[in-house]
Amino acid sequence: MRIVLLGAPGSGKGTQSQILVKTYGVPQISTGDLLRQAVAAGTPLGLRAKEAMDAGRLVDDATVLDMIGERLCQADAAFGFILDGFPRNTAQADALGSMLKKLGRPLEAVVLLNLDLGVLFRRLTGRRICEGCGAVFNIYTAPPDPEAHLAKTGHLPQLIQRPDDKEEVIGKRLEVFDAQTKPLIDYYKGAGLLQVVDADADVDTVFHAIQRAVPPRVC
Ligand code: AMP
């Protein structure tokens, strides 16, 4: 399986990627996660990326492409991958196409998780992450059950909000999606790779829609 999950922030790319990882045994490659790890580790790349991330802007293409080029060459990506949050603009999509051509492993599908703007806003403002284990909750639609969480993980939920999920940054991230990432819909439609999935449903329903959307030889 070599696919891109395309969608605005909050459309469920991360959640669906994790289920695809468990089901098909290929890695999720999330540029957002890789960048957040670099920021947390205080690497030079992380320091360069932090300002753009905190402001809801895209990190520069050269930094992201270096990072993704290295990640795609790691052994676990040889048998497939789910790209989450990459590419984010047509320059990145062109570069991805060239990289995969060199590796002889072209994309098999691009799945667009389609969601209304109002729903996206609510998902992002409500998203909270447990600092102890990284589990993702939503204070409006999927709040944690403290006792169940304690039984499962050994700790109570310690909810934090990603700095870029603050209301004042969300507007900017959605604007950036509209201006820079949305053109990828036509880009991949033109390449015959685009599949559209309605992402305004529960997690299982969306997952089954993704399975139906991805050509059978890919799953
Ligand atoms: P995400 O977790 O995918 O929403 O990404 C969080 C932030 O990381 C974004 O708002 C960008 O600042 C940065 N980022 C993630 N992926 C990319 C990418 N492919 N290109 C540029 N910036 C990115």
Image (tube, rainbow, N blue to C red):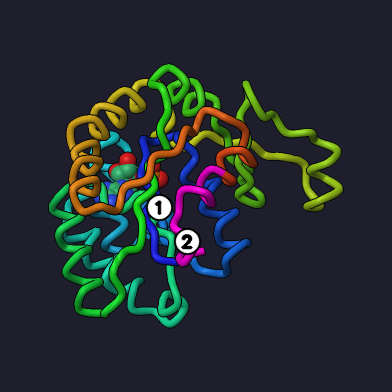
Q: For the N terminus, which image quadrant? A: bottom left
Queried on whether the Cβ of the residue with tag 1 lies below 8 angstroms from ligand 1, the answer reads yes
Residue at 57% x, 69% y: name it: 25
Can you tell which quarter of the image residue 182 is in?
top left
**Residue furthest bottom as drawn:** 75
Q: Nearer the viewer, residue 217 or 112?
A: 217
Q: Is residue 184 above or below residue 108?
A: above
Magenta extent: 209-219
Magenta-span inclusion, residue 162: no
Q: Which mark is residue 28?
A: 2
Judge left or right: residue 59 versus residue 203: left
Judge left or right: residue 33 versus residue 61: right
Identify the residue under disc 1: 84
Badge 2, how many Cα within 10 Å: few under 14, some, many 20+? Answer: many
Residue at 43% x, 60% y: name it: 82
Residue at 41% x, 22% y: name it: 116
The reply to whether callout 1 and callout 2 are in contact (CB within 8 Å) is yes
Queried on whether the Cβ of the residue with tag 2 lies below 8 angstroms from ligand 1, the answer reads no
Three-letter code, disc 2: Gln
Give the mark, 1 or 2, whose residue is nearer the N terminus: 2
Judge left or right: residue 117 versus residue 178: right
Q: Nearer the viewer, residue 143 or 211?
A: 211
Three-letter code, disc 1: Asp
Residue at 54% x, 52% y: name it: 211
Q: Is residue 63 above or below residue 114?
A: below
